[in-house]
Amino acid sequence: MAKYIDNDGFEYESYEAYCNAPGLDPDILGVMLATKRRIPQNDYEKRLLAEIEKLDKKNIPIEFTFN
C-alpha cells in the first residue's frame, strides 16, 4: 500500500490512515465526514455526521470555509 504525505509533510501509512488520523483540522475533518472518507472517531463526530446527513437529506448545501 502506498504511503500518503499531507501538505505539512507528515507521512501516513495510507490515504485512509490520513483521513482517519486524530488531530485533523476541524474543517478538513468535516469534509472527510461529509464525503464518507472518514469513519467517525468519537461521539462528537457521530453527532456531526448525523447533522451533515440531516442537512443533506433536506438538500441544504454544507459549506466548509478554509483560511
Image (spheres, helix red, strand yellow):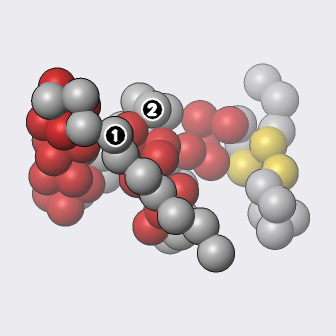
Numbered label tally:
2
Give above or below for 55 relative to 20. Answer: above
**Spot occupied by residue 50 in the image (x, y as percentages of width and height):** 15, 41
- Residue placed under numbered mark 2 in the picture: 35
Residue drawn at 48 percent across, 43 percent down: 32
**Spot occupied by residue 61 in the image (x, y as percentages of width and height):** 34, 40
Kind of element beneath mark 1: loop
| Res 16 → quadrant | top right
Q: Is residue 53 visible?
A: no
Q: Residues within 10 Å of mark 2 (few under 14, many from 20)?
A: few
Name the side, left or right, on which 5 lies relative to 49: right
- Residue placed under numbered mark 1 in the picture: 61
Give above or below for 28 relative to 38. Answer: below
Q: Which circle's residue, 2 or 1, is located before the other in the chain?
A: 2
Q: Is residue 45 visible?
A: yes
Kind of element beneath mark 2: loop
